Image (spheres, rainbow, N blue to C red):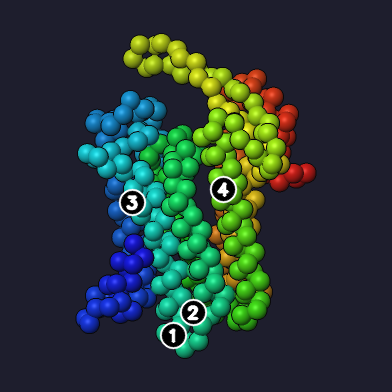
Amino acid sequence: STAIFWAGSNLGPLTEPIYDFGIIYDTFKGAIAFLNIFGMVFCGFLTWKGLNHPSTEDCGSSGSLIKDYLWGTELYPRIGSLDLKRFINCRFSMTFWQLAGLSFAYRSYTLHGVIDWGLTLSAVSQYVYLFKFFLWEMGYMRSIDIIVDRAGFEIQWGCLVWVPAVYTLHTRFLVQNPSGLSLPVASVIFVISIAGVLFNYLADRERDVFRAKQGKCLVWGKPPKYITAEYEIVDRKTGKKTTKKSLLLASGFWGVARHFQYLFELTAAWSWCLLANPLKNGVLPLFYCVFLTYLLIDRAERDSKKCHLKYGSYYEEYCRLVPWKILPGIH
């Protein structure tokens, strides 16, 4: 997507470019207005589809049309082979976020004639983070956003409008309000952000490798501690119960806290916003990292409740091994 975006722009190889590389900034207000209207209509379509033409058995009404619209009526809506939820959540919103930072950095340079190191390094770090996201996309497909939350207004409008508007706020703000950070200062914050991205990836990969090898591996050089948790699933058509097993890792990053990877994600997010220099530009550029802090704390709470219901006493045993949710000694 980056190569295609670059190729069609004035920075690409075309003698007659299709658009300016700063187009995402230039058309941002109109694009968000369109996405807002489209998102509300699209969520109405998803509500109707889930009630009348569901793609899977995980569908149905809550009894309230308002709740159905907000929460969704279907977990995995499809049109043909196209997974609408995955397309919106991953392909559209993450790609928009990834390209927006580069477009904003370019527009800042054309407006001011100098490189804003705070904006540029923030955009690069976010690009690396989202490159990591696409590498780990199947891991995201197992997250609570995908396996629990239905495709309703809360998730789909959020990915269509909230992510493009809020997750890019700190970089978009800098186009008209340069950070004023020197290269050395911006570089220090940039390195911290990259460390957050790297450790977030290593934590996710650690669990993925552990699951793939069914616990038959080393974690931080030692045999891993884990809980073998049993749970039941019920076939909706036959009512037949099937017992399955999951391995709950309690070593490595996952032995420090149950969602220790969130700490690394927040390290990156706060670094990106600090690159907007809130000492000069005020607290507005911090909105994204404050929001994400709330979001991840709430997600950890929701995941804990889900796992208690799913695994029962096995999860209670796991919580005794790993008592902290995100940050040891605090949460």
Q: Which mark is residue 176?
A: 2
Q: Amino acid at mark 2?
A: Gln
Q: Disc 4 to disc 3, how far (Cα)?
A: 21 Å
Q: What residue sits 59% from the left and 49% below the top?
A: 202
Q: Earlier in the sequence, mark 4 or mark 3?
A: 3
Please state the horizontal and vertical placement of residue 78, each as a whole percent of the image: 28, 38
The answer to whether marks 2 and 1 mark residues whose Cβ atoms lie closer than 8 Å is yes
Q: Disc 4 to disc 1, how far (Cα)?
A: 34 Å
Q: Nearer the viewer, mark 4 or mark 3?
A: 4
Name the quadrant containing residue 15. Answer: bottom left
State the SS at label 2.
helix
Q: Disc 3 to disc 1, how far (Cα)?
A: 32 Å
Label 4: which residue? 295
Q: Amino acid at mark 1?
A: Leu
Label 3: which residue? 39
Q: Amino acid at mark 4?
A: Leu
Q: Earlier in the sequence, mark 3 or mark 1?
A: 3
The image quadrant where one finds the C terminus is: top right
Give the side of residue 249 with respect to residue 158, left or right: right
Give the side of residue 35 with respect to residue 305, left or right: left
Q: What residue sits 46% from the left and 19% below the top?
A: 233
Q: Residue furthest bottom?
A: 113
Label 1: which residue? 111
Q: Is residue 100 above or below residue 316?
A: below
